[in-house]
Image (tube, grey):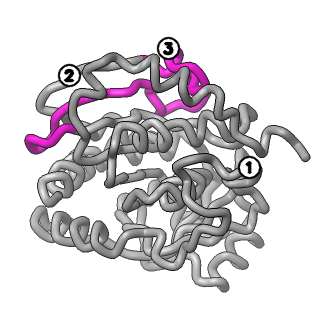
Amino acid sequence: MNTRHQIDTALFNCAFQSLPPLFCEQTPACGLILGSGWSDALDPEEVLARLSYSEIPGLGAGSVIGHSGELLLCTISGCRIVAFCGRRHWYEGAGWTPVALPVELLRRLGCQNLLITNAAGGINPTFTPGAVMAIRDHLNFTGLSPLIGPVIPGWGTRFPDQTTLYSQHLRHHLATAANSINLHLNEGVYVYAAGPTFETPAEIRAYAALGADAVGMSTVPEAMIANAAGLAVAAISCITNMAAGVSASALTHNEVIEEMERVKPRLSALIKTFINQL
């Protein structure tokens, strides 16, 4: 078996010990894992502590534009929040350990709620760039799973149920938050692609036929781990471009970052209002 499919659990203790003591003084109300461009939408009232990913064993600096690579302990809407500003991806080639580590650190800090965000390509033809979608369910045809290997203590049973992986309770809070700021919040199915290439038009047509509304290269692995570990999970996609074959133009990562910058105020308001609902 390719050992990259297995997580180096020895690094979990080292990573946890690298956190400043302030992180452990109080259980956070929510953990955030922020995708491309989403870190700029974070508007904390107070930053209590910060740590570069390069200072966290097993996590390390990322290689993708739009991921700032910083861990924050902060307050938002009066609540204590631990925010991973940027994520690591499977396609970066470092294996599952840096992808899994944020979820494991949140679990060790006692976090019960996790909000995951991403920038995604729109498959649903009713979407336009700037649309926001709460993930109701996902598709994963990659053959990849961060749970391959020995069962990790704290991550539940060998065969975790995924029927309600994305918490209906937290989705209700997202819908209430969106309504209060007059933001139209879609719900839909996200399909996970391993990347780092954008998908082909034929792949997008196949995903559409199977009921997918948006596509991206993240989120699903973290959601699978968090669900197995007993955290309540919510996830949001910001549609930054229409997917291949839906869009008439070539796809670029710069387009993703530019659209995230344009909609940043709406995303910031959604995060704040959602946390206020907890």
Secondary element under disc 3, as helix, strand or loop, is helix
Which residue is painted at 48% across and 32% down in the image?
67
The tag on residue 150 is 1
Q: Residue 124 location in percent, x, y?
A: 51, 77
**How many C-alpha atoms fall within 10 Å of the one at disc 1: few (<14), some, or many (≥20)?**
few
> Which quarter of the picture shows residue 252?
top right
Q: Specify whether 156 is left or right of 203.
A: left
Q: Mark 3 to mark 2: distance in Å?
A: 17 Å
Which residue is painted at 65% across and 53% down in the image?
250
Of circles 1 and 3, the one toward us is 1
119 is higher (above) or lower (below) than 139: above
The residue pinned by badge 3 equals 55
> Which quarter of the picture shows residue 12?
top right
- The magenta-colored residue range is 52-80
Q: Residue 32 location in percent, x, y?
A: 35, 44
Name the one closer to the observer, 206 or 104.
Answer: 104
